Amino acid sequence: MAGTKQAVSTGSEPQLACPVSPVVDIVFSRWTTPVLWALHTYGRQRFVELQRRVGAITPKVLTQRLRQLERDGLVVRTYYPEVPPRVEYEISELGLSLAPLFAHLTEWGTANLGRVEEARRAYDADPARA
């Protein structure tokens, strides 16, 4: 029935309490968003190019993140058996399907991050909170 809320279990599985949790776990871990953003914005890239674009990420962490994103189906890794070998990464169709989500989050941030900062300043300045 439209508009009817289903009962939500608050058991030990967080995805039952909040169906967004598994998505947040996949997409919003520490380095996932910058990696996906760089691949979406700049297209196919080699490891070193991607590392430069993402910023302060270490090679070890970037390797781990890329492997996890490949496992999740969000990134495609292509190996070229040349001398020297070449590997390129690109965002997959599944990864591209996240673009509207990122666009909405960007819009929200543009519209609201100033208000968040104001709220933080007010909270921090409140003598009752000291």
Image (cartoon, grey):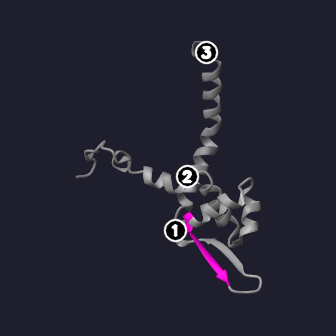
Residue annotated with mark 3: 130
Looking at numbered disc 3 in the image, what kind of residue is underneath it?
Ala
* Badge 1: residue crowd in 10 Å (few <14, some 14–19, many ≥20): few
Is 99 or 60 nearer to us in this picture? 60
Residue at x-position 61% and y-position 56%: 33
In the rendered structure, which disc, 1 or 2, sits on the residue that comes first in sequence?
2
| Residue 74 included in the magenta stretch of the image | yes
In the rendered structure, which disc, 1 or 3, sits on the residue that comes first in sequence?
1
**Location of residue 29 with respect to 64 vertically, above or below:** above
Residue annotated with mark 2: 28
Q: Nearer the viewer, mark 1 or mark 3?
A: 1
Judged from the image, the secondary structure of the residue bearing numbered disc 1 is helix
* Span highlighted in magenta in the image: 68-80
User: Is 46 displayed left or right of 5 in the figure?
Assistant: right
Circles 1 and 3: CB distance less than 8 Å? no
Tell me residue 53's x, y (percent). Answer: 74, 60
Circles 2 and 3: CB distance less than 8 Å? no
Q: In which quarter of the image is residue 41?
A: bottom right
Tell me residue 84's x, y (percent). Answer: 77, 82
